[in-house]
Image (spheres, grey):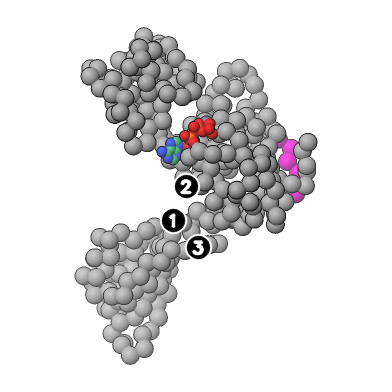
Amino acid sequence: MQNNNRLRIVIQKSGRLSTDSKQLLIQSGMKIDLEDKRLITFSENMPIDVMCVRDDDIPGLIMDGIIDLGIVGENVLKEELLKRQSKLEDSNYIKLMRLDFGHCKLSLSIPINTNYFDINFFNHTRIATSYPYILKKYFDDKNIIFKSCSLNGSVEVAPSAGLADGIFDLVSTGATLKANGLREVEVICYSYACLICKSNNMNLFKKSIINKLLTRIKGVIKARESKYIMLHTPRSQLKKVMKLLRGAEEPTIIELGNDNKKVAMHVVSSENLFWETMEELKLLGASSILVLPIEKMME
Ligand code: ATP
Ligand code: ZN
């Protein structure tokens, strides 16, 4: 039964998205028992319940309006969307934001020794995949006729087992492909984890919790991407130093105790500081360069 006074979030139970999803909720201020193996866990300090399921079930729970919020890979989301659209089933949802984890790509791969010329190679072939709808859309747009062999696991062994001419699957390092005598020939799309929300009749109370959570999640991600930089620089080089730290907010300039040729500069940078930039700062006469992580941020 739906409880209108508590927001329900669904995340992956165990797999590549689960640790990051749980961590994101905790860093956003939610007190929740991570070790709890129950299907639904209740947050102690916020009116939020967290449900843990297989990632493939997440888009459907949102599109059917059963659960309010979900964290899922765009790959799984898109496949479910295309599947439902082809069957004229409910497929509404709102994508609230892309998250900063779960990065992967969907690619076409073929046996290493097969000669590849261009995408038309795939005309009249059979492709093993767990993403038949994404693949169909891609090939339909290119007028390529193919047959799919739908597998939910061990997709990469299909060519050597004589089940398919190639595969369409997630690739991260490429090690699995190599181990199975395959090579990637086309990257079809990239994917990240994203936060999605059901699109129908949410009450004002739930909407206000979602807005609060969204602000906090944005703050957590922004903090993870940002650094607090402190350094001493010759007063004469201040402009050049500031230019090197471009993209940063306005810096704070502080006088030093007994050295009026130098000043201290503190700045929040929206990106990490690479060694190369630190070396350039050093050449300008900067010293005591510190790069610190930021825990929380609110703009
Ligand atoms: P489940 O048991 O929940 O069905 P699964 O085996 O289908 O899990 P996982 O391997 O845990 O799925 O991957 C979950 C999602 O993580 C993928 O659908 C994709 O969005 C993302 N993902 C895939 N590979 C990587 C990777 N190397 N690094 C980060 N995220 C990835
Ligand atoms: Zn899955």
Distance CA(mark 2)–CA(mark 1): 9 Å
> Residue 142: image x %, image y %?
39, 18
Q: Is residue 199 above or below residue 114?
A: below
Q: Residue at x 49, y 23 (%)?
A: 152
Residue 130 sits above or below residue 98 on the image: above
Q: Are marks 2 and 1 in contact (CB under 8 Å)?
A: yes
Say whether residue 178 is visible: yes
Residue 49 location (% of width, % of height): 69, 46
* Residue type highlighted by circle 2: Asp
For this orientation, the residue located farthest to the top is 124
Looking at the image, is mark 2 or mark 3 earlier in the sequence?
2
Is 259 covered by the magenta stretch? no
Three-letter amino acid code at the position of disc 1: Glu
Q: Is residue 252 left or right of residue 212?
A: left
Q: Which residue is mark 1?
A: 225
Quarter location, residue 226: bottom left
What's the residue at 53%, 62% (across, down)? 296
Mark seen at residue 113: none
Please tell me whether mark 2 sits on a helix, a strand or a loop: loop
Q: CA distance from mark 3 to mark 1?
A: 10 Å
Is 231 rendered above or below residue 119? Answer: below
Viewer-proximal residue, 245 or 16?
A: 16
